[in-house]
Amino acid sequence: MCSTKATPKFKQLKQSYGFDDVAIVPGDVTINPDQVDTEFQIGKFTFAIPFMASAMDSVVDVNMVIHLHKLGGLGVLNLDGVQARYANPDEILEKIAKASDADVTALLQQVYREPIKDNLVGDRVKAIKKAGAICAISLTPANTKRLAPIVQEAGGDILVVQSTVTSARHISKSYRGLIFSELCKQMKMPIVVGNCVSYTACLELMHTGIAGVLVGVGPGAACTSREVLGVGVPQITATIDCAAARDTYYKETKKYIPIITDGGLRKGGDICKAFAAGTDAVMIGSPIAQTKEAPGRGYHWGMSHPHPALPRGTRVKVGTNTTLEKVLFGPTSVVHGTENFVGALRTAMGFCGAANIKEMHNADMVIAPALSTEGKFYQMTQKV
């Protein structure tokens, strides 16, 4: 006779959702897109558009930071990369772009073995400040203690401390890890930390005194952490959970700490869904890597690609087929949503009756896996 007793559960899994699984429900009231407010703040700094360029060597150099500043956004310069290792990083970027697929990972591992030079860290910051742009610098936790004071002394404005997964509590036998609460007291700059994907991790990070949190583990076009390590949470669920942490923290402290959805954003619809899910800004990589202004020369690779023992990224060919201004503001003649991101966000906010980003957080969403295929027979069977 079969037993009717229930089998004890070892783990209870919850459903999670990515951009392709959900849709935004239009509001009962609509607003003209040109009347919505898209401003975004980190600390005392206000940006006209809530768009940040990823701290990757293929996406951001000094010139990209300056250009994006003029357009109202924020470029984050990776000073764990070639910009702080080589006096002439363009030569190295050219070499990476020309490498074969078979040789590029070994080449990157070799390139990133070159030590970081303190003087180059200061030089890059000063070049950005000389142009009148807001200077946001990204460092890994391992290098933050040494390099953050140099960034601050050179005039840096925002410090981003970033790794594949970052937590407020790090255990190590070999060294005393980076303590964010101490770092926030030492630095005069607002500090943005990433990356995380859960309510508890996000809330703990906020309690250390940081000024922003990057949300996303492994969704980027050039990242293979999900394949190599099996870690990550789809971005809609990760954003919703971290937005809940932000709101809990605000209720506790009356301090609003923005969250920034980082990675996996390919087109305007993804970006609009991220804001409906609760993000305050987005960080984008591969769409900017495709622009003529990008330093990657039509290629894109992740920060974890050069790891000496366990690379977790791949160089991808994205091509050079647009400009930074077209990606952000258009005009565009493409119909798949890969340009005019700001226009898409403004239009979606208007459809939802959201006068600003915080009101966009209140937009209803539905689980909608057929959103991009329903009624699209001809689009799926013909070349667009």
Image (cartoon, rainbow, N blue to C red):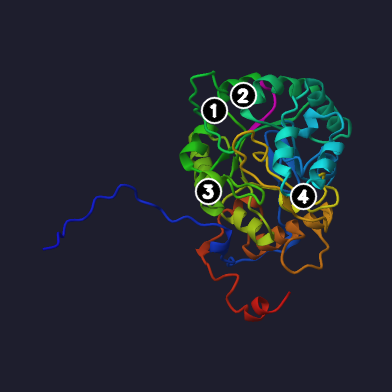
* Residue for badge 2: 184
Disc number lying in front (4 or 1):
4
The residue shown at (50%, 23%) is 172
Q: Please give left or right for residue 133 compared with residue 35 in the image.
A: right
Give the mark, 4 or 1, whose residue is nearer the N terminus.
1
Q: Which residue is mark 3?
A: 238
Q: Secondary structure at mark 2?
A: helix
Specify the quadrant that holds the C terminus: bottom right
Residue carrying label 1: 208
> Where is residue 301 drawn, in percent x and y?
71, 45
Give percent across and percent down for residue 313: 64, 44
Q: Dot 2 surroundings within 10 Å: few (below 14), some, or many (20 or more)? A: some
Amino acid identity at mark 1: Thr
Residue at the spot of label 4: 299
Nearer-N-terminus badge (2/3): 2
Q: Are marks 4 and 1 in contact (CB under 8 Å)?
A: no
Specify which label sits upstream in the sequence, 3 or 4. Answer: 3
Between tags 2 and 3, which lies in front? 3
Q: Earlier in the sequence, mark 4 or mark 2?
A: 2
**Where residue 364 is drawn, which disc sits there?**
none
Distance CA(mark 4)–CA(mark 1): 36 Å
Circle 4 — which element?
A: strand
**Residue extent of the magenta highlight:** 187-192
Q: Residues within 10 Å of mark 1 (few under 14, many from 20)?
A: some
* Badge 2 vs badge 1, beta-carbon distance below 8 Å: yes
User: Which of the marked residues, 2 or 1, is nearer the chain's N terminus?
Assistant: 2
- Depth check: give the residue in front, 295 or 134: 295
Instruction: Tell me the kind of residue under disc 2.
Output: Cys
Where in the figure is residue 265, as x and y percent of width and height? 65, 54
Q: Quadrant of the N terminus?
A: bottom left
